[in-house]
């Protein structure tokens, strides 16, 4: 186990509850075939189950039956061993978080009031609600003092989705249902939100059921992946590793699509690799001392951290001017330790340093990942695959992965101006 794994993969106690569907069917009047036909499966407590499949396959209908937004025609759904029909509908829904595309915030309510809806319905006092709102804003990476009083129209799409997640967690429910939660944001924000949810899940260990159309998102996010065919017939329900390596039938194989070998990069996490530990500096620290420390370490750049060990920037040593270290004027893109190698490559390709800053719980700094580390790992994966198949593993373009990636400039090339 690497140092990163020991820091970031320590699992908290499970706070989720097992979900069991037994013979669940949904039939609408006037339709000959059921929308959901006799589906049975178990989602273990504390795991993320990704429901994926083509439009009309019944994945959202199945999701909504768990909190009785849609009532099953027949069959049984239990949460934590208790039949969901044993509770009144309103009582049930207050114990299940629900997050949908775009966050679905009430536009006339502030961020704090949006998050506080369910706790208020449960009769929490104002002090407890305020503390919970601030706790959740911090958890999803938003400064409570800046955001609690804002309104949805004052937030970006990604920020609105974060507030939606916070609202779903407000009453500390054991189960969270998510319906295409990241479908309305741009790809970069989507990756950040995915990583943030994985970080939150690492800390809270809820039982999360998430609907998506994106098989790559399902592979990245899920502890288990459910591939549904029309009528919510189960094509396959298994771990991402098994779904990619051993599709259960032709439909599952077609849905996973070509390039399953490349998709396996989504199974490898940044936490599996060793991170480099360059020179760091804290805001307010003496700049001259930081420069001396960096030069002694042979580093051309430093990672600037705040008082809570969160990375703020990655400036070159020559950019450290003035008596003290100040917060860099840049938009630093962090990479969560649970991010995939695909995400790492995407992030590093747009980085001016040929690497990426890696963070853990609550955005705490862990180190940096470099191109060489990733390409060495990919080459090792390729050697293992060749040993298994006794063939030659190639990319979709017939190129060796490292031959495509290693041409990226290093820190030294960028700094010296000799980058290709």
Image: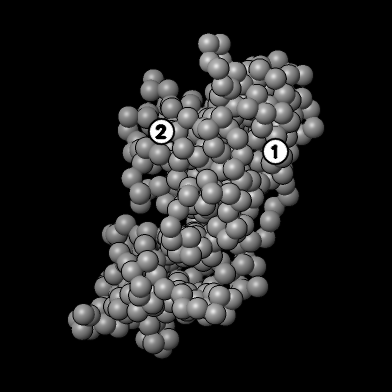
Rendered location of residue 166, percent (x, y): 52, 36
Within the image, what quadrant is residue 303 found in?
Answer: bottom left
**In the figure, is residue 153 to the left or right of 100?**
left
Nearest to the eye among marks 1 and 2: give it: 1
Q: Which residue is found at the position 39% from the left and 87% from the top? A: 298
215 left or right of 175 in image? left
Residue on which the image places disc 1: 41
10 Å crowding of disc 2: few (<14), some (14-19), many (20+): many
**Residue 240 in view (yes/no):** no
As rendered, which of 372 and 156 lies closer to the eye? Answer: 372
**Quick one: quadrant of the N terminus?**
bottom right
- Residue 340 screen position, x and y as percent: 49, 61
In the image: residue 143, left or right of residue 135? left
What residue sits right under mark 2 in the picture? Answer: 102
Query: Residue furthest toward the right?
Result: 81
Q: Say above or below: 90 vs 223.
A: above
Observer-nearest residue: 298 or 221? 221
Q: Looking at the image, how many numbered discs can be counted on the residues?
A: 2
Percent x, y of residue 15: 71, 42
Query: In the orientation shown, which residue stands out farthest toward the top?
Result: 30
Tell me which residue sits at (66%, 41%) in the image.
Answer: 207
Residue drawn 74% across the image and 25% down it: 76
The secondary structure type at the circle numbered 1 is strand
Separation (CA) of disc 1 from disc 2 = 29 Å
User: Secondary structure under badge 2?
Assistant: loop
Rendered image quadrant of residue 334: bottom left
Residue 218 location, x and y as percent? 52, 48
| Quarter of the picture holding the C terminus | bottom left
* Cβ–Cβ under 8 Å for marks 1 and 2: no
């Amino acid at each position: 186990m690497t140092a990163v794994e020991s820091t970031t993969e320590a699992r908290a106690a499970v706070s989720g509850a097992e979900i069991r569907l037994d013979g669940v069917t949904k039939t609408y009047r006037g339709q000959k075939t059921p929308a959901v036909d006799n589906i049975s499966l178990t989602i273990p407590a504390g795991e993320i189950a990704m429901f994926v499949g083509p439009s009309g396959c019944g994945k959202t209908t199945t999701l909504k039956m768990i909190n009785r937004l849609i009532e099953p025609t027949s069959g049984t759904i239990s949460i934590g061993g208790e039949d969901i029909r044993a509770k009144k509908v309103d009582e049930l829904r207050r114990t299940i978080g629900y997050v949908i595309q775009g966050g679905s915030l009430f536009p006339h309510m502030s961020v704090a009031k949006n998050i506080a809806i369910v706790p208020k319905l449960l009769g929490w006092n104002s002090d407890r609600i305020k503390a919970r709102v601030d706790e959740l804003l911090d958890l999803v990476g938003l400064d409570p003092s800046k955001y609690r009083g804002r309104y949805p129209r004052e937030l970006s799409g990604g920020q609105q989705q974060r507030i939606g997640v916070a609202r779903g967690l407000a009453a500390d429910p054991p189960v969270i249902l998510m319906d295409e939660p990241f479908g309305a944001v741009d790809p970069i924000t989507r990756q950040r939100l995915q990583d943030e949810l994985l970080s939150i899940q690492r800390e809270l260990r809820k039982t999360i059921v998430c609907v998506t159309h994106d098989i790559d998102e399902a592979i990245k996010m899920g502890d288990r992946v459910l591939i549904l065919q029309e009528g919510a017939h189960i094509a396959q329900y298994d771990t991402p590793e098994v779904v990619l390596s051993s599709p259960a039938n032709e439909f599952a194989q077609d849905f996973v699509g070509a390039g399953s070998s490349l998709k396996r990069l989504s199974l490898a996490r940044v936490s599996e690799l060793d991170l480099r530990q360059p020179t760091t500096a804290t805001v307010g620290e003496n700049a001259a001392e930081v420069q001396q420390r960096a030069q002694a370490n042979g580093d051309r750049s430093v990672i600037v951290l705040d008082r809570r060990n969160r990375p703020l920037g990655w400036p070159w040593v020559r950019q450290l001017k003035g008596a003290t270290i100040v917060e860099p004027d840049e938009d630093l893109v962090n990479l969560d330790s649970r991010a995939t190698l695909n995400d790492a490559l995407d992030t590093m390709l747009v980085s001016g340093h040929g690497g990426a800053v890696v963070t853990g719980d609550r955005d705490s700094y862990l180190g940096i990942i470099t191109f060489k580390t990733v390409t060495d790992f990919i080459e090792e994966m390729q050697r293992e695959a060749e040993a298994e198949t006794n063939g030659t593993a190639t990319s979709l373009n017939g190129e060796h992965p490292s031959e495509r990636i290693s041409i990226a400039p290093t820190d030294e090339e960028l700094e010296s101006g000799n980058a290709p």
